């Protein structure tokens, strides 16, 4: 196979959403599998809706996921001269033409077609043909440029995901490929016009030598036009793979309204990038029964086969399970930094990373996310509020004397886990109690909850003064 080159081409009209992150992962993994290149292109021709903030969020999300690109980011609005050049060549070659229809005229055209019960489409009135007289050029109208789509025949491709697809050219009309610039798009755009998605994407995929295009299947209807434009340009066709949409847990398309769909919102909620990648990989692709695998394994396995044809359903519980796996595996020093960020987002600033690492080591097995881990760690720094029920159930008259004598012991001993454990043992012996009687009371008072990991290990995380203060009123 010649050089594999893939790309992801998000539009900066919003954050990088999960569907795009998944196709970015597939494109990246495919390039890495074949030792090829992965390109990032920002499709910013929707001038009114594109923002610099969205560009930054996309770059941020890609960096967080670790999907490194070999080339780019390229920006389409910096390539206007190239689109203009290709358009001029196409007009000269007769594969594109100017059209002076006004919006009112196009509305009237569609209205008449609807009235006749026909499918609405551009009727080709400005398309040159031998012996055809074109309408007189109206004054004061800026033309668009349309692609002269082949009128007959089939457009066919063997989709990497969906298999063979054929569309009749009679189904598709002469698409606009270049428009006059909207107000505010800048002088260059005003002079050269702005390309439409289906045209710019072809010029770019051609110029950037893209060999394989993975994208969402909402673009399947665009592909016949793109293939026809590739052919009109004499450009080599990439292979296309259209991945089915991701469904929300209600069976509807995953969307903003149906819960978070930006990649970075998962980072902020305490998910790890390796968990997101593992989960996204499986959402539309499989390698046998493997559910948990490293990125290196994915690169080794991802050869473009075993991509799912039917939509996958977003499953928050499974994502949490995958994330819990990676939280357990994560290095404690790394978790400490992440917990520190989570806490600082709650206005709890903690400088002691060594303490956060020890706390992470102790609690991480119980957590699905770093946010949950921070929920545990927070009790060390923020006053706890035990519930009345827990207090009544565990801090009983029978254990109060023992709690008081433990408090006195804790006031003077060396503050480390073995010495705390020894103090606990002595207290139990002196009061003839068992650990299951004393430990829950201590947990409720110090931690605000009746269940924690081993109480001596937990107490050792706290500053002595905090423990004594929480055992003050007995
Ligand atoms: N800008 C398009 C999008 O964000 C890219 C589609 C493609 O990959 O061709 O949907």
Image (tube, rainbow, N blue to C red):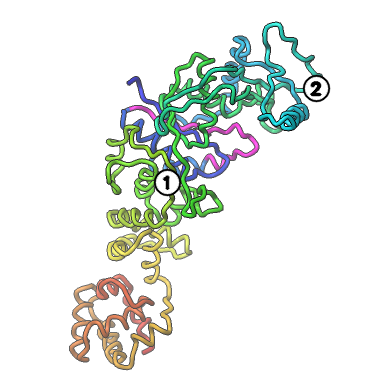
Q: Is residue 206 left or right of residue 351?
A: right
* Residue beneath disc 2: 140
* Residue beneath disc 1: 312
Q: Residue furthest right?
A: 139
Q: Which region shows up in magenta?
A: 36-55
User: Is 95 drawn above or below residue 390 in the view shown?
Assistant: above
Q: Quadrant of residue 340?
A: bottom left
| Residue 197 included in the magenta stretch of the image | no
Q: Residue furthest top?
A: 131
Q: Residue at x 65, y 37 (%)?
A: 48
Q: Secondary structure at mark 1?
A: strand
Residue 460, percent from left and from top: 27, 72
Other-residue count near label 1 (Cα within 10 Å), few / some / many at <14 / 14–19 / ≥20 = some
Q: Residue at x 31, y 28 (%)?
A: 35
Residue 230, percent from left and from top: 51, 19
Residue 411, percent from left and from top: 28, 82
* Distance from the alpha carbon under mark 2 to that under mark 1: 50 Å
Mark 2 or mark 1: which is in front? 1
Q: Residue at x 18, y 80 (%)?
A: 422
């Amino acid at each position: 196979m010649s050089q594999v080159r893939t790309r992801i081409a998000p539009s900066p009209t919003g954050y990088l959403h999960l569907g795009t992150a998944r196709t970015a992962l597939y494109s990246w993994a495919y390039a890495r599998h074949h030792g090829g290149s992965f390109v990032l292109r920002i499709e910013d021709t929707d001038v009114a809706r594109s923002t610099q903030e969205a560009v930054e969020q996309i770059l941020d999300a890609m960096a967080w996921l670790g999907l490194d690109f070999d080339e780019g980011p390229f920006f389409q609005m910096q390539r206007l001269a190239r689109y203009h050049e290709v358009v001029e060549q196409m007009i000269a070659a007769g594969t594109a033409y100017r059209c002076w229809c006004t919006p009112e005229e196009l509305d009237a055209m569609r209205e008449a077609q609807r009235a006749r019960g026909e499918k609405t489409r551009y009727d080709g009135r400005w398309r040159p043909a031998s012996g055809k007289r074109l309408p007189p050029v109206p004054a004061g109208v800026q033309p668009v440029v349309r692609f002269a789509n082949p009128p007959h025949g089939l457009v066919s491709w063997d989709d990497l995901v969906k298999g063979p697809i054929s569309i009749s050219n009679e189904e598709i009309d002469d698409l606009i490929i270049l428009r006059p610039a909207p107000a505010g798009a800048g002088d260059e755009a005003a002079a050269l016009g702005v390309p439409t998605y289906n045209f710019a994407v072809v010029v770019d995929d051609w110029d950037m030598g893209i060999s394989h295009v993975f994208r969402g299947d909402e673009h399947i209807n665009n592909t016949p036009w793109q293939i026809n434009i590739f052919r009109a340009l004499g450009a080599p066709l990439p292979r296309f793979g259209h991945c089915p949409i991701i469904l929300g847990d209600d069976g509807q398309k995953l969307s903003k309204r149906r819960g978070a769909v930006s990649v970075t919102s998962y980072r902020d909620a305490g998910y790890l990038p390796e968990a997101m990648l593992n989960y996204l990989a499986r959402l539309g692709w499989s390698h046998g029964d493997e559910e948990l695998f490293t990125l290196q394994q994915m690169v080794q396995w991802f050869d473009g086969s075993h991509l799912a044809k039917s939509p996958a359903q977003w499953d928050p519980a499974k994502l949490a399970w995958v994330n819990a796996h990676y939280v357990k595996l994560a290095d404690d020093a790394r978790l400490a930094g992440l917990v520190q960020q989570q806490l600082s987002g709650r206005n709890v600033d903690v400088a002691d990373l060594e303490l956060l690492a020890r706390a992470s080591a102790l609690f991480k097995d119980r957590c699905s996310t770093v946010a949950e881990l921070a929920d545990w760690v927070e009790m060390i720094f923020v006053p706890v509020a035990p519930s009345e029920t827990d207090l009544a159930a565990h801090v009983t008259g029978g254990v109060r004397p023992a709690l008081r004598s433990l408090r006195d012991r804790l006031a003077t001993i060396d503050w480390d886990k073995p010495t705390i454990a020894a103090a606990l043992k002595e207290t139990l012996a002196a009061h003839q109690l068992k650990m299951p009687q004393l430990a829950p009371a201590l947990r409720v008072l110090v931690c605000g909850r009746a269940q924690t990991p081993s109480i001596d290990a937990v107490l050792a995380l706290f500053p002595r003064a905090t423990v004594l203060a929480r055992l003050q009123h007995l």
